[in-house]
Image: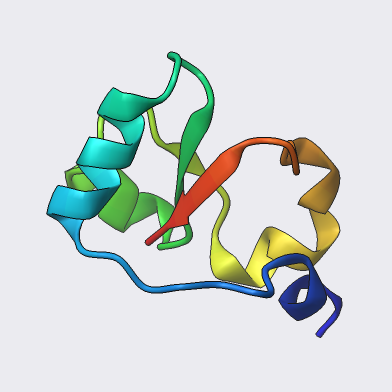
Amino acid sequence: MKWMQFLTPVSSINWEQANKLAEDNPKGDVVFLDVRQPSEYKAGHQPGAKLIPVGDLGDRLEELDRTKHLVIY
């Protein structure tokens, strides 16, 4: 899968750490990427999160800014 290379190296963080990362960086420098299905996103998501279902990720990589911190869930 070509998108795997885009996401490496990665580290795991918890929600508290992810929110701290967003607080500690200028607004817009941290992107929350929701890779669940649209129905799951609609049921509830991180405010401001971008939805790209994991099955579509390979075709939509150009939508992601590689200079930003990316929190994927």
Q: Which residue is most to the left?
A: 16
**Residue at 54% over, 60% down:** 53
**Residue at 80% over, 76% down:** 5
- Quadrant in which residue 19 is drawn: top left
The colour scheme of the drawn protein is: rainbow
| Depicted 68 relative to depicted 25: above or below | below
Residue nearer the viewer, 18 or 1: 18
> Across the whole image, how many numbered discs are drawn on residues?
0
Left or right of 17, for residue 21: right
User: What quarter of the picture does the N terminus occupy?
Assistant: bottom right
User: What quarter of the picture does the C terminus occupy?
Assistant: bottom left
**Residue at 83% over, 59% down:** 59
Residue nearer the viewer, 18 or 36: 18
- Coordinates of residue 52 in the picture (x, y in percent): 57, 51
- Coordinates of residue 17 in the picture (x, y in percent): 22, 52
- Coordinates of residue 34 in the picture (x, y in percent): 42, 52
- Quadrant in which residue 46 is drawn: top left
Q: Which residue is most to the top?
A: 27
| Depicted 13 relative to depicted 17: above or below | below
**Residue at 53% over, 48% down:** 70
